[in-house]
Structures are given as C-alpha cells and as structure tokens.
Amino acid sequence: MNDMSRLQPAKLSENHQRGCARTFRELRLLLTADLYRYGGRTDAKAFWRHFLFTPGYKYTVHMRTCGYLKTRRFKAFGLYPLSKWMLLRCRYKYGIAIPEYTVIGPGLFINRFGGIYINGDAVIGANANLTHGMMLGQANRGSRAGSPVLGDRVFIGAGAKIIGHIHLGDDCAIGANAVVTKTVPEKGVVGGNPGKLISEKGSEGYVNRLVPEDLLRRCREASAAKSQG
C-alpha cells in the first residue's frame, strides 16, 4: 500500500485542500494517468475523445482542474468560480458527486455514471474503479466515525455502499449492492448486506489497464513535492 492509501481522512466536516493538485505538472500527470485507464493511450486524440464523450473522464478533468485552481492565488483571478460552476453542472448532468478536494490517487476510472457519491473526506488509492450507484459515505458517530480509506486497485461494484472510517486494503473487490461497514483485508472480496468476506481472490480481472509504473512514480514524486512544500 502506498503513501496515498495510508492517509487518514480529515476530521468530520473539515474544510481542506489535501486532494488538490498544487502544481500544473501534478495536475497534468494525474489527468494523464486517469486517461490511460480508459483506453491505454494518452495522446491528444484520446484526451478529446474521452473528454467529449466519456462522462466519467469529463467529470474527472473538471474535478481535478477545479481543485488545482482552488489553490491558486486569488482563486486564479476568477477562473476558480467558473471551474466550480462547470463541475457542479457536470454533477447534476451526470449524477457524479465527488468534491474537488477529495484525496484520489492516479488512475481513477469511473465506469458508467449516475448515483456516484463520494464524501470529500474519503481517501482513494491509485487505479481505482468506481461504478454507478456506489457511495463512500461518512459515519457521524461511534467507533467508526469518519469516511473510508481505500487502497490501490480497488473495485467497487454497482450500487455498493462503503460507510464509516474503515479501510479497504489493496486489490479489494466489493460486489454489487454490498453494504460494507467493516475493514476489508488485502485482496478481500465482499458481498451482501451486511457485507461479508466471501473470498480472497481480490480485484484481479476487474481492475484492468493499470497505469504504467513510470507514470505512477512521476505522479507520486509530484505529490511528494507538494507535501514537502
């Protein structure tokens, strides 16, 4: 599990910018990694194809760009409010609600769209697969108060709900309509309501077209530079 997936979520309802790209280089690398997940290509033709016709990637571009502009001096002289408006427009159009400040690793893949809700305090590792109807939700009280922390290469099936400050280890797979309120070990496969561990075969075969290691390394270096700054 890399440093991204070990981060702890922010305090309940805390306003933060931890998931925002702080440099244009970091933004570009993250969007390149995300783009690779959709077709294995990162050229200009692939970018415009998916930005114009793939709702998941279009939302990701607006989300990460909005987060970057949020950190700029004077809110990028008016560009941040415009970017925020475009992000909200995409939210209502496609039914995807992921705040721009959410900590999300490289290689986010949103399969289909509609009914996707991510609490802004959640943490998502690299090469994540999100599917329509899924939720990463916050628990407001009890021993698991807070939001989920996901490792790398995690697959979330359609309609699945992951709630509370729990950890999903690397290579987990959550089945369709499962309700998960307990920590899941690496390569755990969970199904049902309440969610139960049904195998340890992991997400192999469900999370494909992984971001190349060299690109992942550059993304992590850019993120580390942000943390040190």
Image: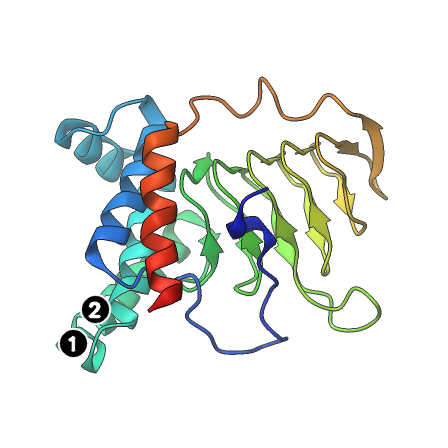
Distance from the alpha carbon under mark 2 to that under mark 1: 7 Å
x and y percentages locating residue 131 in the rendered image: 54, 37
Residue 135 left/right relative to 208: right
The chosen color scheme is rainbow
Q: Is residue 59 visible?
A: no
For the point 19% across and 82% down, the residue is 74
Residue 180 left/right relative to 205: right
Q: Which mark is residue 134?
A: none
For the point 59% across and 41% down, the residue is 1
Splitting the image into 4 quarters, where does residue 10 fall? bottom right
x and y percentages locating residue 13 in the rendered image: 58, 77
Q: Please report contact status of discs 2 and 1: CB closer than 8 Å, yes or no.
A: yes
x and y percentages locating residue 184 in the rendered image: 76, 42
Locate the C terminus and report the quarter of the image it occupies: bottom left
Q: Mark 1 sits on what residue? A: 78
73 in relation to 226, above or below: below
Residue 227 left/right relative to 120: left
Q: Mark 2 sits on what residue? A: 82
For the point 51% across and 38% down, the residue is 128
Quick one: 174 or 199, which is closer to the camera?
Answer: 199
User: How many marks are shown on the rendered structure?
Assistant: 2
Q: Of the residues shown, which amino acid type is indicated by label 1?
A: Gly
Q: Residues within 10 Å of mark 1 (few under 14, many from 20)?
A: few
Quick one: 145 or 7, which is closer to the camera?
Answer: 7
x and y percentages locating residue 113 in the rendered image: 46, 40
Quick one: 45 or 29, which is closer to the camera?
Answer: 29
Q: Is residue 224 visible?
A: yes
